[in-house]
């Protein structure tokens, strides 16, 4: 999961300077559509956690599932 999210982020950063959490999420699910039903929470959680730990710099636009509320 972490490798997939980081790879997706790295690919997006090559194209543009500012990447949103939603763009990373969309890239992951475009790449692995079967994760939509199975791992939606885990993808959102991984993006939030890596952003919080400054592993990747994404802008938070508020469109992802808030994993802290669940």
Image (tube, rainbow, N blue to C red):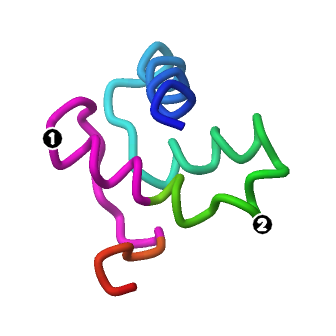
Q: Quadrant of residue 31?
A: top right
The residue sitting at 32% across, 54% down in the picture is: 48
Q: Position of residue 24 (x, y in %)?
A: 51, 42
Please give the label number shown on residue 53. Answer: 1
Rate crowding at label 2 as few (under 14), some (14 to 19) or many (20 or more) other CA atoms within 10 Å.
few
Badge 1 marks a residue whose secondary structure is: loop
6 versus 35 height, above or below: above
Magenta stretch in the rendered image: 45-64
Residue on which the image places disc 2: 37
The residue sitting at 29% across, 58% down in the picture is: 60
2 versus 66 height, above or below: above
| Quadrant of the rendering where the C terminus is positioned | bottom left
N-terminal of the pair, mark 1 or mark 2, is 2
Left or right: residue 18 compared with residue 2: left
Residue at mark 1 to residue at mark 2: CA–CA distance: 26 Å
Q: Quadrant of residue 10?
A: top left
**Is residue 12 found inside the magenta-colored segment of the image?**
no
> Which residue of the protein is positioned furthest toward the top in this rendering?
14
Left or right: residue 27 compared with residue 15: right
The residue sitting at 64% across, 40% down in the picture is: 28
The residue sitting at 27% across, 50% down in the picture is: 49
């Amino acid at each position: 999961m972490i490798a997939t999210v980081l790879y997706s982020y790295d690919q997006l950063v090559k194209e543009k300077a500012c990447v949103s959490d939603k763009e990373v999420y969309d890239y992951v699910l475009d790449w692995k559509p079967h994760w939509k039903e199975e791992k939606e929470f885990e993808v959102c959680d991984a993006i939030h956690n890596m952003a919080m730990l400054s592993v990747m710099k994404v802008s938070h636009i508020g469109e992802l599932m808030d994993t802290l509320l669940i």
